[in-house]
Image (cartoon, rainbow, N blue to C red):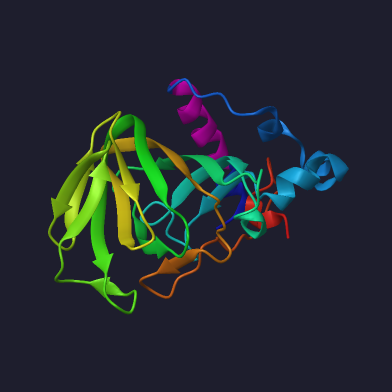
Amino acid sequence: MKRSRVNDILAEGADFFAKHGWSLPPFAQWSAEKLQGSDGTYIRDRRLGWDITDYGQGRFDEMGLFLFTMRNGDMTEMGQQGAMLYAEKLMISRQDQLSPMHRHVLKTEDIINRGGATLVMELFTCDAEGQIDRAADVHVLSDGAPVTLPAGGHLKLPVGASVTLTPTTWHAFWGEGGDCLIHEVSTVNDDLTDNIFAEPIGRFSDIEEDVAPTHLLVSDYA
């Protein structure tokens, strides 16, 4: 993906957040220079900020996700008294834009539709080896109420609705009928080690530097 395209997506995403009444923290507007300096150490270490991915496939409009991580703990501190054990993100899933099938090793997350269109979740459970079980029913909580779906069933979340996904729940999602503003509240997030994809794809985009970045992405911090 070209950096110029990333910059355009950033601007579109920020406008979408604002349209739905979400204001980002001040560090969202920091320059690359400030973020790379000592003021940005905490932001970089916790991998907070802008995140645009096409999963390394170069087809963002078909397969991709827009994210902004607002707060995040440190996986190495899990279990310690006083540790930050949670994370929070805003995401945009565009109409028919697939976030591909995956699950997590440790993270449990609430996925909440905060605005826009209907969010569709395709769900499977794990077999004994942790792979997709294409026969077993899926059991999840939606706003605290138990829901049972057949393997590969689609759970449709209107605005305001949510689903709780545990590490044994395989999930893919997209917007139906329009773009969706998604709020994720979870245990500590680690996109470097805690994602298992059903297909051999990457978590981050390969960026072609044709222009200067408007804002750094979390994948730029390294």
Instruction: Name above or below for residue 125 compared with residue 79.
Output: below
Identify the residue at the far right of this view.
38
Image quadrant assignment for residue 38: top right
Q: Is residue 220 magenta?
A: no
Residue drawn at (61%, 48%), measured in percent from left and top? 4
Residue drawn at (73%, 60%), measured in percent from left and top? 222
Q: Nearer the viewer, residue 191 or 37?
A: 191
Residue drawn at (55%, 61%), measured in percent from left and top? 204
Identify the residue at the far front of this view.
81
- Picture coordinates of residue 182 (x, y %)? 40, 38
Give left or right: position of 171 versus 21: left
- Our reading of the magenta stretch's main secondary structure is helix
What is the magenta range?
8-19
Q: Nearer the viewer, residue 80 or 6?
A: 80
User: From the image, which quarter does the N terminus lie in?
Assistant: bottom right
Instruction: Name above or below for residue 46 compared with residue 204.
Output: above
Give left or right: position of 59 versus 162: right
Q: Nearer the viewer, residue 214 or 174?
A: 174
Q: Is residue 13 magenta?
A: yes
